[in-house]
Image: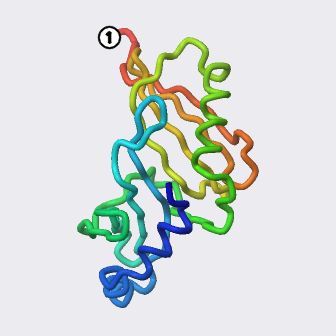
Amino acid sequence: MKTPQELLRGLEGEPLFKSWQKEHGKGFLTHFFCAVSSQGQFKSAWEIGFYNPQSQKMTIFAQATENSFEIKPEDDVFKKPTDAIEPLKINEVKIKYEDALRQFQQKSPEEFPKEVLSDGFIIVQTLQGKTVWNFTFITKALKFVNLKINAETGKIEDKQIVELIDKGTS
């Protein structure tokens, strides 16, 4: 698997990206995204996101082949109104995906002992100033489990379980 840095260099060499960048010079790199199986195997190509602060929209470049990309139309950003979109600190991604996955696979049974994982996704992003491999999986009990692993140090930064079904009384 190519590293995020290698994927970014490949994208930056594409005429498609260069053309987009001329029109969206203020846009900045925000994330890498990929759907994965419960074992962490890739189920989709990598998508690389760029945020345009002027339009407040996101442009996604999806890896079409090993060495080419397609552009998706600019779209709204999925975030809370109080959240800031942070530039991805690509130079802080020192832990390879395989090492972050191994860390997730070692730690998730103790962090989420009762959960059986189904498919999910991985995002490389900077959140609250820390660059993380952000693993999110849906469980057989319809919950999301999330573990953020620091992309520079390999340490766990955050974990959470989110119930998809509201079990409140009506």
Identity of the amino acid at label 1? Answer: Ser
Residue 102 % position (x, y): 63, 36
Q: Which residue is mark 1?
A: 170
Residue drawn at point x = 48 percent, y = 17 percent: 116
Q: Residue furthest left?
A: 73
Q: Residue 26's image quarter?
A: bottom left
Residue drawn at point x = 48 percent, y = 45 percent: 122
Q: Residue 72's image quarter?
A: bottom left
Q: Residue furthest bottom?
A: 22
Residue drawn at point x = 37 percent, y = 58 percent: 77
Residue 168 % position (x, y): 40, 13
Check the picture and name the quadrant holding the C terminus: top left
Local crowd at mark 1 within 10 Å, few (<14), some, or many (≥20)?
few
Q: How many marks?
A: 1
Depth check, front residue: 158 or 123: 123
SS of the residue under disc 1: loop
Residue 107 % position (x, y): 67, 28
Left or right of 73? Residue 114 is right
Residue 109 against residue 25 in the figure, above or below? above
Left or right of 83? Residue 11 is left
Left or right of 33? Residue 157 is right
Residue 96 against residue 140 in the figure, above or below? below
Residue 127 against residue 90 in the figure, above or below? above
Q: Residue 24's image quarter?
A: bottom left
